[in-house]
Amino acid sequence: LLAMELYCLGNKAWQPCYVVRLDSATVMLDCSLDLSVLLNFLPLPLVYSPMLAGLSRWKPRDTQNGSDVMNEDTSNLFCENVGHTFVNSQPLVRLPETRLVDVSEVDVLLISNCFSMLALPFITEKLGFHGKIYATEPAMHFGRQLMEELVHYVTRKPSVNRSEEWRNDYLMKMLQDGVLKDSHDYLGWMELYSEDEVRRAVSKIQPVSFSETVKLFGNLKATSLSSGFCLGSCNWLLETEYCKVAYVSASSTFTTHPSPMERPRLFSADVLILSGLTNAPSADPDSMLAELCGRLSSTLKNGGNVLIPCYPTGVVYDLIEYLDGFLDRNGLSSVPIYFISPVAESSLAYSNIYAEWLCDNKKNKVYLPEPPFSHAEFIKNGRLKHFCNIHSGLGSVYRSPCVVITGHPSLRCGDAVHFMESWGASVKNCVVFTEPDFDYMHALAPYQPLYMKAFYFPIDPRLNFFVANKLLRELSPQTLVAPEVYLPSCAQSHKENLCLQPEMPYHGISTGRMLSIPVKTKFQRIQLSPEIAESLFPREIHPGVMAASISGFLSSRNCKHILHPRPHHPLPP
């Protein structure tokens, strides 16, 4: 048996980060960043906000003597509104659980998609990683855009309070349980990286193509296979000559713009690591899109505006195409769509450049020749307008009613903060949440009381449990490894659409845990040193069959096993 060690470093099941030790090689799979902790901080408006400035200051009471434990210097550390407490400081993010593994010992980092690489600058610039990094070219570029947008949003207000005094054990104990979201490890939250660190980290990535095999370490090879989730997203296949490990993360079987999921090479793996399933398992993307359009239509016809806070890549390309056709069919062709992001222009441009990474329907448009996505035509005829921010020309063309697509989906930074303040007082307007990775009620909390309507229509094309169960039966791995929350023992229900129902042996894993998984293998390849090869004198034992006896010392290093001749002198003690 060959032992494979698997470490789970990701904070959430849909924010994967694993480390695999296999055949003397150490491989990191993805490096997601937990952005949900942004919800614990106050929004970052570009200018003074009377609404946010008017929020109540949270003051804990010393339970022993009843006196305030806050002083004038620390009285502004926390604000509260509608039962939620917010930190009045520079927003922080949460890294993967890197204390479990020495990152400097990792040989290779494999990235699956642009959303699962947001912790890369921490890994390469702060934690001592010096190995190789592989990702597809679209994942590399769109991941860079996501990081650049986030850095721009968080750092563009230089006057923000950077006090660290709130990270006080005594103060945190005064907070009621659950008031701060996922705050059990608040001391480990870190300030975001810089634009320069993003550039240096991305420059270290070596791009690969779909189905391209790269040699990682000795006999270990890795192959990227299309996962169908977003442009350039892939699953990874790790192989030695007698072992096969499949890593399936953030995959989709929906017919959208990316190249479809490639499955044949994933069949019959010795171990299949499954992660990154949909974060909205009961929400069908097509139904959510139809409901979104219904609410959008009624809001626009009543003279209201629609705000859609989302990421600048991924589902947004399909959303823009669908919205444009919907507006035409419903007599709203005069309603403009504004796409606002510091990377809006480059995101739209890159999506039309990477034709070979798209589904066949869009790929074939290149040969007509036409742009794969229709948003190029929408920009040309003025239906879609993109801006770096609200001050880069939006005011000269703005008209209402309109649809605004901007970030950040957490509503804690970016131009979405401006529109929430500007439109929140009117019942005619609405905000529609499509990203499932943020608690939308928590996102809205600092803006209450809010008169604009709020809707939650998560559009997440990643595998749900029903499709994942069907896929597992098709792939038939020898052993399955999945987050514990996906498995029947931890799920609220054993129904097939609410948890995995594996028909093969399986292991559950959670943050900070290590699994040792036996991998059945009958053979290992051994190389003969030139000295051993020269000393062999095969003899024929059957017609056409030669054999020779071999003895020596076996050395195993860098996943390679070499047989050397025995030394003629005794070994030193």
Image (cartoon, rainbow, N blue to C red):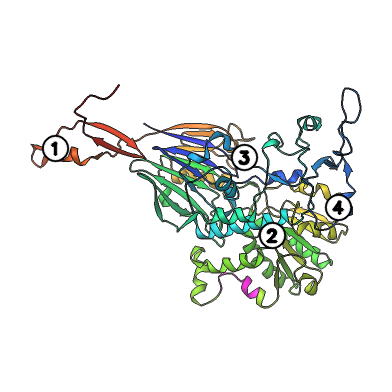
> Are the two marked residues, 1 and 3, in contact with CB atoms closer than 8 angstroms?
no
Q: Is residue 466 above or below residue 178?
A: below
Indicate left or right for 546 with 502 as reference: left
Rendering coords of residue 221 (x, y %): 39, 47
Q: Please state which amino acid type lies under the numbered disc 4.
A: Leu
- Residue placed under numbered mark 2 in the picture: 290
Q: Is residue 255 above or below residue 110?
A: below
| SS assignment at label 4 | loop
Indicate which label's residue lies in the foreground, 2 or 3.
3
Indicate which label's residue lies in the foreground, 1 or 3.
1
- Residue placed under numbered mark 3 in the picture: 11
**Is residue 112 in view from this perspective?**
yes
- Mark 1 Cα-neighbour bin, 10 Å: few <14, some 14–19, many ≥20: few
Return the disc, 1 or 3, that comes first in the chain's sequence: 3
- Residue placed under numbered mark 1 in the picture: 536
Name the one closer to the observer, 420 or 415.
Answer: 415
Return the disc, 1 or 2, that comes first in the chain's sequence: 2
State the CA–CA distance, disc 1 to disc 3. Answer: 55 Å
**Is residue 510 in view from this perspective?**
no
Return the disc, 3 or 4, that comes first in the chain's sequence: 3
Q: Which residues are magenta?
A: 371-378
Rendering coords of residue 364 (x, y %): 49, 71
Q: Please state which amino acid type lies under the numbered disc 2.
A: Ala
Indicate which label's residue lies in the foreground, 1 or 2.
1
- Residue placed under numbered mark 4 in the picture: 450
